[in-house]
Amino acid sequence: MLENFVTYNGTSIPAVGLGTWQSKPQDAYNAVRWALEFGYRHIDTAFVYGNEREVGQAVRDSKIPRENVFVTTKVPAEIKSSAQAEKSFFSSLANLGTDYVDLYLIHAPWPWDEVGKDCTEGNIAVWEKLLELRSKGYVREVGVSNFEIADIEAVTTATGVLPAVNQIYHFVGATESQLRDYCQKRGIVVEAYSPLGTGKLLQNPALCRMAERYGVTTAQLCIRYCLYKQTLALPKSVHRDRIAQNISLDFEIAAEDVAFLDAFGNC
Ligand code: A2P
């Protein structure tokens, strides 16, 4: 079983992280405490999730040494200037109550209310700021999220530095395989957010039947599938039993079933 992904800089990232998008602050606190108790060592948050404080508090309260927990946060998608990115970073750092962030991402190439807008200049400015934060030791790795190939090429061409990670929407039936292959060929770690299709996949009869054959839950099947595609999975849950379940992935999926899941969007 794959336990870590390694960036092109040699940084190890645990292959499954707890997602906290849409987790309310107190729920996020509990979820992170349980996750760390069950062996997760990777927590994904973002400034806009509004739960950085509770995530940071939970990591501290766990008493697990800080260096043993990989924490990711993100510059809000609407921030497209160097000065604002710096300000936002130090707000995140204060919220998390930590000295450094393991992975800092540009949340999206465009503001959420202007999806598709060309913000190339702003993305380059923010990317340069992230590189500066990394060189000063405030962040260990820098990357992007929701970036398409052209967005990645723009920041890379301008600075000569490839993102270490691209965190994308990735689940059975929605795998953006062209983007995924592009990233993987270049050594960019692909992280899958919403690996359960935000929960929508879990009632699918074909997936439920397949999971039953393996004696696992549909959630476990979907998360394991992401790992088969060499994508790091970030399942979100605020329930103790589900959090435990989502990291219990010690089973294999037969090649023909992986192929079926690959073609799932076409079923
Ligand atoms: P909850 O947080 O109430 O447990 P995704 O990671 O794709 O965004 O999916 C998250 C959604 O799936 C949330 O609604 C979450 O609910 C639900 N979920 C997460 N893990 C499981 C699980 N093991 N079984 C059932 N539902 C789950």
Image: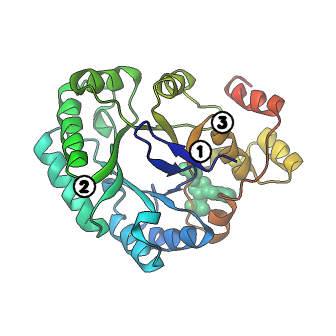
The verdict on label 2 being within 8 Å of ligand 1 is no
* Residue that lies at the very extreme toward the front in this rendered image: 10
The secondary structure type at the circle numbered 2 is: loop
The verdict on label 3 being within 8 Å of ligand 1 is no
Q: Sort mark 1 into few (<14), some (14-19) or many (20+) by Cα contacts within 10 Å.
A: many
Q: Quadrant of ligand 1?
A: bottom right
Earlier residue among tags 3 and 1:
3
Question: In the image, 82: left or right of 138?
Answer: left
Earlier residue among tags 2 and 3:
2
Judging by the rendered image, the residue that carries numbered circle 2 is 138
Residue 35 in which image quadrant: bottom right
Q: Sort mark 3 into few (<14), some (14-19) or many (20+) by Cα contacts within 10 Å.
A: many
Judging by the rendered image, the residue that carries numbered circle 3 is 172
The secondary structure type at the circle numbered 1 is: loop
Judging by the rendered image, the residue that carries numbered circle 1 is 195
User: Is residue 194 in view?
Assistant: no
Which amino acid does the dot numbered 2 rest on? Tyr
Residue 24 in which image quadrant: bottom left
Query: Camera-side residue: 21 or 192?
Result: 192
Which amino acid does the dot numbered 3 rest on? Val
Q: Sort mark 2 into few (<14), some (14-19) or many (20+) by Cα contacts within 10 Å.
A: many
Q: Is residue 60 above or below residue 127?
A: below
User: Is residue 27 in view?
Assistant: yes
Query: Camera-side residue: 23 or 180?
Result: 180
Question: In the image, 239: left or right of 216?
Answer: left
Earlier residue among tags 2 and 1:
2
Which amino acid does the dot numbered 1 rest on? Pro
Q: Nearer the viewer, mark 2 or mark 1?
A: 2
Question: In the image, 41: left or right of 216?
Answer: left
Q: Is residue 156 above or below residue 75?
A: above
Residue at x-position 61% and y-position 38%: 171
Q: Alpha carbon of mark 3 to alpha carbon of mark 1: how far?
A: 8 Å
